[in-house]
Amino acid sequence: MSKPKSHNTKVKNKNLDFSVTQWCSLFGVAVFFLFFSYQSGLFNGFSFDFELPIYEALMYVFAVFLVVLAYLSRYMNYDRPEFPVGVGMLLIPLVYWISSFQAVSYHNAVMMVFVTALYAVFFLSAQSLISTRATRIAAELILYVSSYSIVIFGILNAMGHVYRKHAIWFTSGTYRLSSIFQYSNTYAGFLLALVLCAAFSAVNARLRIVSWIHAFMLVPIWISLMLTYSRGALVLLPVLALAVLIFLRLDRQIAYGGVLFVSAAVSLMILGPFTDRYVEIVQSVLPEFEGAPANLRSIWDWVSWQNWLWLIAAATVSACLTEAIRAAQPWLERRLAGLEKYRFSSLVLPAAVVVLGGLAIGVVLRTPVAEKLLPQSISERIANINFRQHSVLERLTFYRDALKVSADYPLLGAGGGGWNALYEKYQNNPYISRQAHSFFFQTLVEIGWIGLLFLIALIGIIFVFYLRHYWKERKQQPGHLVFFILAFSILAHSMIDFDMSFVYIGALVFFSLGVLGAVYRDKIRLSRLSILNQARWRYLYPAFLGLMSVTMIVQVFQEYTSAHYYQKALNMAVIEQRPLHDLLEPLDQAIANSPAHPTYTYTKIEWLSQAYRQTGDRSYALQAKELIERIKMVEPYDRLIILSEYRNHKDLGEYKELMEALEDGISKFQWDIQFYEAAIMEYAVNGNSVKAADPDRAHSYWNRGMELYEEVLRRKQLLALLPEEQLQGRDFDVSNFLRQAVGQILFGQGRYEDAVAILKPMIETDLSDVYNRIGVRYYLAALHMLGQSDADLMNRLIEADSNEKAYFESLLQ
């Protein structure tokens, strides 16, 4: 009787076979990283303005994944960690999907399901495709070529040869480089990871030419990092460098530290003159006003060429010094071989660096050394590094507010985009931040503690599994450590900023995590899962993933189509200026394809409201009301929708519903002074309108208006308690509009002295403004009731509007 075949005999040997589908899939991955990154890093800003490129990337990635599945169905081993870890990754988009059923912004929740599904695709693709040394080298090449092209693009902008909006942005008196990301802190986090990876590859590369390229690129990376003016990245850099050192053998630690030091030193030597010319170039290139063309520099421009020469010379010196360090490595390895036998030898150099680095940082920060070494703008930024600076205090506020949100949505969160929808309800002060400035806190808000723990567990398991096996072959110093450095560094920086809101960055991280999960998958066998390798079972998993991919493509294409219909409607309205019935045709198609999209529905509401005000046809206002009621079911926290609801009720004369909308706005946007202004004004005006017929109701309106005014004053006192270094955010003060509304209420209540006190600042305002005239009118009336007058002010008021005399007399009656 013959011996039964093992379940694994049905699985192809992926280490020996050449697979067309494998290399075609890798080519598809390369296209994504090389080209889609230039769509502003595929920033997911929870706004229509950022959605189209993401939809295009999603459809492309899911289509490529179908090719990956053709490879996976033949070569996947279910009795290896690849399968359970892959299922663990799929739990992340699954939790986002479940949380979307209770989401505070359904459209954004669905968008995050799409985005996390894309991350899962990159993770699963890396796990499946990166199975040989050749494919690992290909993956490394893809990431480096993509990353270095972004650095070069940023340098081209800095030299004035290329202009991209917000690739360089002026803030806090400095021109901050941001390359494709249009946000300097994310670019700094990306460069932080890249400089650590490039230094490792410069030391570890087998081929001299490969080492030389990485060493050469270190100088442009350092220069770009300094020009981001990111203090957070500079603070994290030594910490992450020390973390990397621990995983290198002793001679490589010295070489790695040496390469980082010499490349940084060479970069600092040219940073001063480079920055001076950089500022000169940027000032001449950037458009004078929005929409104006950029004044690009010629490739032969001498000022730009001086910077190119400095950069090339410094990069060449860095490469030569790196080559000298590499040449000394064999000697170092022999000399330090004895120390390698000791268990904690890998910690000796990091410990020494901590001590010496701490002393060096203290010298730099407490003496004029930084001012002499660095340009003034950069030295000032470094000198201001402390835990009391506004950016630190503001982030701590974001994180405390995120915990407040999670207390109300603890298990599954508020759905994707939950922070963007809810932060104004829970915020400590009136800041504006549509991102929580932390990947992990934002994840907590979106999918709760269950989702966050799933995510942390997945990342932790992959890191532990990889490092546990890597440590056993640390002496061979395998090159795949670069994927750990990349993922670990970006995730570390994303703890204090929203790097992962850029889909390109998120794809980089999860692709790297997938590679880490694939490297040592053959070290463990899960025998109980071997049955899944049989033909009758092995195709179920790829078939399920294929079905999900096709479903995603269909749903994303539907959103993509609706976005194009919406753009067509806008084009017809703005450029062609077509009549309303023509505009509504493509807009209705957009809404039909994406009924939960707030932007499309809000646009139709506004157009219908404008038609009502122009024609007086009540049917337009009623159609708008129906749309508002429907969209509020899935977007209850959309500020524009709530304001549209208020205006719609005002158009229809529905006072009770109007006030409910404003009260709803105040409860959800507790630091938005405009809601308080509108509500107090409505309570004042409507109190005046019913005081003769129903004095009790008038006083109830006025009392509520005064309660809201007292709340404004209370919140102003809270703002006074903010640390001096922390910025308040938006204005939150008693405006003239609010002042005159409160003055009306006080006058109606017979509190004439209080009315005079609050309205007096308005006597110096511009009386061409109707609300300023109302305030002055009530001020004069209150004076009259107190037996006083101001003839000059009365003359000014009547000069501004001759009807004011009649209005004034009607008040006295």
Image (cartoon, rainbow, N blue to C red):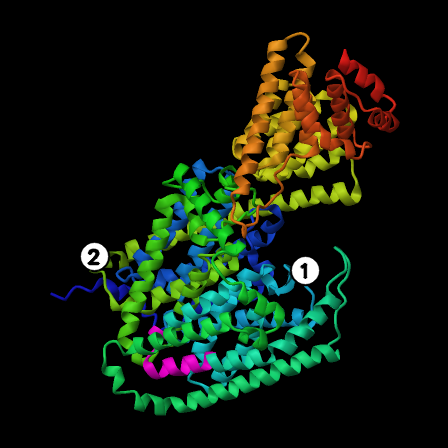
Image quarter of residue 185: bottom right
Residue at 60%, 10% in the rendered image: 696
Q: Give the percent coordinates (x, y) of residue 141.
A: 48, 74
Q: Which of 646 and 480 is in front in this view?
A: 646
Q: Badge 1: how crowded within 10 Å, few (<14), some, or many (20+)?
A: some
| Residue 420 placement, left or right of 81 | right
Question: Split into 4 quadrants, where in the image is the C terminus?
Answer: top right
Identify the residue position indicated by label 2 in the image: 528
Tell me the magenta residue range: 245-260
Query: What is the chief secondary structure element of the magenta stretch?
Result: helix
Q: Residue at x 67, y 60 (%)?
A: 165
Whether 57 is drawn above or below 352: the answer is above
Q: Which type of secondary structure does the marked residue at label 2 adopt?
A: helix
Q: Which SS class for mark 1?
A: loop
Q: Is residue 756 magenta-colored?
A: no
Tell me the number on the disc at residue 595: none
In this rendering, position of residue 281 left or right of residue 323:
right
The percent coordinates of residue 550 (x first, y second) are 47, 50
Within-10-Å neighbours for mark 2: few <14, some 14–19, many 20+: few
Q: Which image quadrant is residue 196 in?
A: bottom left
Query: Residue at label 1?
Result: 165
- Horizontally, is 734 left or right of 637 in the view? right
